[in-house]
Amino acid sequence: MIIQLGRYEIQGEIGQGAMGVVYKAKDPLIDRVVAIKTINLGLALDEKEEYEGRFYQEAKAAGRLSHPNIVTIYDVGKSGDVAYIAMEFLHGQELRDIMNKGGLLPVDQVLDIAAQVAQGLAYAHEHDIVHRDVKPSNIMVSSDGHVKITDFGIARMASSAVQTQTGTVLGSPKYMSPEQVLGKVIDQRSDIFSLGVMLYEMLAGQAPFAGDNVNAIMYQTLNTAPVPPNTLNPEVPEMANFIIAKALAKGVEDRYQNARDFAADLRACRDIMPRSGQQKDIQRISAAGEDKLSGAVDITRQMRTGEEDAMSISHAGLSKAFDSTAATMRLAALTATSEDIDQLSKTLNIARPGAEEIKQAAPASKAAQPGTHAVRRPQSELPSRTYGGNFMLAVIVMLVLLLIAAIIFF
């Protein structure tokens, strides 16, 4: 084992990273424990120079990021054919290890983890850095639930290295966006799709796109829409279905356009849910041999039977406006009076929906709305909260209108 990298004293091996070994080390200058990620530069000379140059460029860009939800990079260096990045040493676990322990985390905790990731991504995107490889193994979670994204900048290096050596860019197929699969130029919306895949997997207990091989996974990513996660886990609220559907839209224009909006919706969904109680210690595994997290949901009892149609893969598109004012207007049209709808139309400065739009928005409609991802259930099986939600929406609309009237006339 390596005992020294630059000035850093190697204390032990943490694990294997995507591009090399990860070590625990000590910086003797300031007596600080760090994590060292190594990158093998054992390439042909011309490839090595190009790759090394890009490595420093990417490491420098990632080093500019300073955010509570992004791992901090301290230093970058080279020793022989090994380049390395020194970063903060995190006390926690990879999200992948947490997910592999069995069962599902409580929904509110899943939403909180995803919201923190979205916040970190938003900050990076605003500094013109796209992660390109958002997946559970690149997310660290501390025992108190604090989340950090790792491998910013390194993700592009990993793809470059594979491309240089084999001529084919390999990523993490389960989490790749459609534009990544097609080899198109990507932007921040690709990271949003990948986070949507990760969120779906945490809530449903299975990936939205799966298959026996890479080609099958990529085909599904490009052509199919997964069933809503609450058909696999009834504890998932309806609002989360729409958030995930928007994040997983095939077209980039139909997706969340920035991660801040994604984070805001995740927090709003989390805040309307009852809390699962004290924060679970996600790092603790019972010494008595407990093989899953405390408080985890047993997914084997969540699968609904007799819903083969709902479980089949839908080839429908996805809505362009799950959380838009237009969608709000259509829903209001189902519950409010004609006069109230006219007033709301003037307040929001958007056209009143036509009869066909109202029909498409109705939850009991038999015809799927073009561009909508939905699972049809018998009317008798529709959850009672659907009707309660419409009533509450009507009440809220009336209160807003009364407030506007009070401001205008008084």
Image: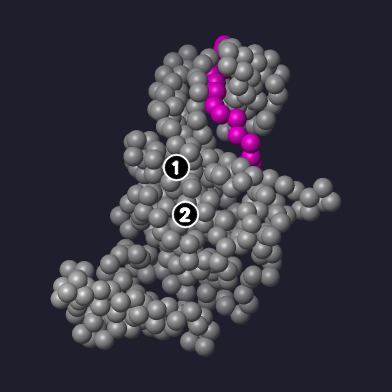
Which quarter of the figure is the C terminus placed in? Answer: bottom left
Question: Element under label 2?
Answer: helix
Front-most of residues 398 and 165 = 398
Q: CB atoms at circles 1 and 2 under 8 Å apart?
A: no
Q: Is residue 324 left or right of residue 111?
A: left
Residue 318 counted in the magenta span? no
Q: Disc number at residue 196?
A: 2
The residue at the far bottom in this view is: 380
Return the x and y of residue 63 as percentages of the image width and height: 44, 27
- What is the basis of the colouring in this image? one colour
Front-most of residues 378 and 168 = 378
Image point (43%, 61%), residue name: 268
Q: Residues within 10 Å of mark 1 (few under 14, many from 20)?
A: many
Q: Which residues are magenta?
A: 79-97
Which-is-in-front pick, marks 1 and 2? 1
Residue 95 counted in the magenta span? yes
Quadrant of the image occupied by residue 398: bottom left
Q: Is residue 287 left or right of residue 97?
A: right
Return the x and y of residue 337 as percentages of the image width and height: 26, 86
Q: Amino acid at mark 1?
A: Gly
* Tag 1 residue: 120
Q: Amino acid at mark 2?
A: Gly
Identify whether 368 is placed above or below 132.
below
Image point (52%, 66%), residue name: 273
Image point (49%, 61%), residue name: 270
How many numbered marks appear?
Answer: 2
Question: Gap between marks 1 and 2, in whole Å?
Answer: 15 Å
Question: Element under label 1?
Answer: helix
Residue 241: in sight, yes or no?
Answer: no
Q: Residues within 10 Å of mark 2 (few under 14, many from 20)?
A: many
Return the x and y of residue 107 as percentages of the image width and height: 57, 61
